[in-house]
Image (tube, grey):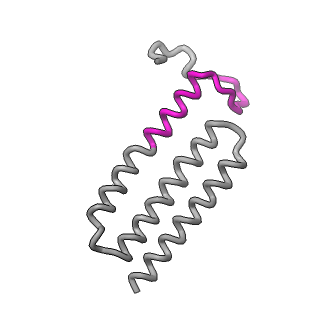
Amino acid sequence: MLDFFGFSFISLGVLAFLVSSIGLIRMPDIYTRMHIGAKSTTIGILLIILGAICIEPSWAFKLIALASFILMTNPLSSSVIARASHNDNTPHLNPTNTDEYKNREDQS
């Protein structure tokens, strides 16, 4: 029974990766692509890790450590990509044409 839940979680994780890959193709600019890439892949890998824990409970400690590492680093890397894109003046779709970070002094 636990194997069924494990394979179900893994299938949902693969589905989240599929949605993420379609979103990366369909989204128009770097900022929306960054958003879909960060959120969907985080959910996808966490579902796959949860499925692996259900299938092989003896690996739970290592997999939970891996999941916590992913939860800490994936949003950070997404923010770094967004900031680097902004500092590089990458064009984006913004109907108001306001840039709240333009006059910040700590632009490094």
Residue 63 against residue 52 in the figure, above or below: above
Residue 74, horizontal then vertical, whole percent: 44, 45
Count the numbered circles shown: 0
Residue at horizontal 65%, vertical 26%? 90
Give yes or no for residue 16 being in the magenta stretch: no
Q: Residue 25: x and y, percent?
A: 70, 49
Query: Residue 18's quadrant in the figure?
Result: bottom right
Q: Give the magenta range.
A: 75-100
In this view, the residue in front, 83 or 95, is 83
Residue 33 image offset from top left, x and y in percent: 63, 43
Up the image or down, 95 lies above or below 15; here it is above
Magenta stretch encompasses residue 85: yes
Residue 43 higher or lower than 50, as above or below:
above
Residue 56 place in picture, x, y as percent: 34, 75
Q: Quadrant of the N terminus?
A: bottom left
Which residue is pictured at 44% across the width and 16% down the height? 106
| Residue in front for this viewpoint, 59 or 99 | 59
Q: Is residue 53 left or right of residue 9?
A: left
For the point 34% across and 56% down, the residue is: 66
